[in-house]
Image (tube, rainbow, N blue to C red):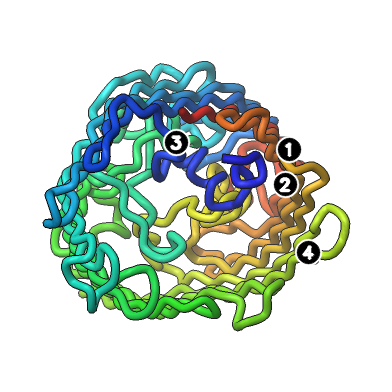
Amino acid sequence: MTHAAMLRPTLLALLIAGAGNVSAYELYADDDTHLNANLEATFGIFHSQENYAPSGRLSEGSSSWREGYVKYGLSFDQGLAGAGTTYGAFGLLSSGTWGDGDAAGFSDGSERTTKIEDASLGWRSAGLFSALGEDGVDLSFGRQNIVVGDGFLIDGDALNLGKGVADGEFNRGGAYYLAARKNFDETAVLRLGGKEGWRSDLMWLKSDNRAQAKSELYVGTLEHVAKEVTVGLTYIDVTDIDEQYASPLQLDRRDMKTYSLRATGNAGVENLFLSGEYAEQDKRHVDNEDAWYLEAGWTFKDVAWTPGISYRYSRFSENYDTLFYGFSRGYGTWFQGEVAGNYAGPFNSNSKIQQLTFKVSPLENLNLGAMLFDFKTLDKDLGNTDGQELDLYAEWGVTQNLMVMPLIGLYQPDKSAEQGGTQLGNNDTNLYSQVVFSFMY
């Protein structure tokens, strides 16, 4: 794996969010059998000059904290003499938060735990069903990560609250920002179709995350994958929640149905990137809600440092349920603004957001980026999260296995918490800083 390959946005997302194993140590291999040891370790140092109100626990001031996790385990695949391939993974994850806890007060710095993270088995069809393509049938069960599209609706079960809210009832053991735990507790997944043309997913997912009200849901997708554009339909039916852990918004999640149409690609133009999705939610007791975004980007591949620029407009209705959105394409998806998206809000609800991103690659193993956000609240009676944020970051591939990612953020809210916003004590510009070290083997 080259340094250049390490710096693709999707791989940055893997390194931080742990959506899959980038590499592994091969313990045993022959023509039909592979047994690997997997190791993933991420550690971050964070400081925010201002605190925020969402947990109700903090007061005016600053927060400094550290987060980390180590995920370790085994994975295998075994050929079945012309009858496809079976595969599986088992792994533990140890995580913790130290110091003050995060700037929104979701963690208090005392979180520590070790739990099973991976526990899954699956079967792929290889060439058994030629009409569906290579591995055109893929059936898997157990505790595993699930991503739909670019994570606008589902990107793992990665909300990792700590002991800072509800007397610790929602605690998952630390690493709130790093989202250490992201696997759904129980899954049954059938994937049909190869890597091109028509394909579909049928899934049953069960969360054990109290912050997600331990939701149970069925998911169906239908996609057409082509070089120029991938178009997809998604259907999500939340069949059950645990009401004792549900927020007022999540109480309307039971029997909620979400429909979405999405597309991404370059429309046949090499340097172009286009993406968009529209989602509508049918709820039992309230009006339908919706969310959508449109994004366009251009990479100047023949210019020194290969600069790229992109613009996105997204809108989330007043009581839109964000479900399980995540970090699929790197910074800004779908935690929009490192301060706003993680601590201050909006948390992809009751808002319209504009995002302008600029990236350059001065070295093969170094990316530099800047993101500018503008946040506008739709219904200010529900709270005012108007503001602007500028984030400057670097992605440095120190080695093939180690990435260092420093970031500086400037967040300017329009209102303080006392004026209906979320920043405690004032609406001064917050200087936020973090550096994340991520290692995979």
Give the amino acid type for the residue marked by disc 3 in the picture: Ser
| Few, some or many residues within 10 Å of mark 3 (<14, 14–19, 20+) | some
Q: Residues within 10 Å of mark 1 (few under 14, many from 20)?
A: some
Which residue in the rendered view is the most extreme toward the front? 31
Quadrant of image for the N terminus: top right
CA–CA distance in space, label 3 to label 4: 28 Å
The residue that appears at 18% across and 63% down in the rendered structure is 190
Q: Nearer the viewer, residue 274 or 320?
A: 274
Name which residue type carries label 2. Asp
Residue at disc 2, secondary structure: strand
Q: Nearer the viewer, residue 386 or 3?
A: 3
For the residues labelled 2 and 1, the Cα–Cα distance comes to 6 Å
User: Reading the chain from its start, which is encountered first: label 2 or label 1?
Assistant: 2
Rounded to the nearest angstrom, the CA distance separating label 3 from label 1 is: 29 Å
Q: Nearer the viewer, mark 3 or mark 1?
A: 3
Q: Are marks 2 and 1 in contact (CB under 8 Å)?
A: yes
Residue that mark 1 sits on = 408
N-terminal-most mark, 2 or 3: 3
Tag 3 near tag 4, CB within 8 Å: no
Q: Which numbered tag is attached to residue 391? A: 2
Q: Secondary structure at mark 4?
A: loop
Q: Earlier in the sequence, mark 3 or mark 1?
A: 3
Name the residue beneath numbered marker 3: 23
For mark 4, what is the residue? 301
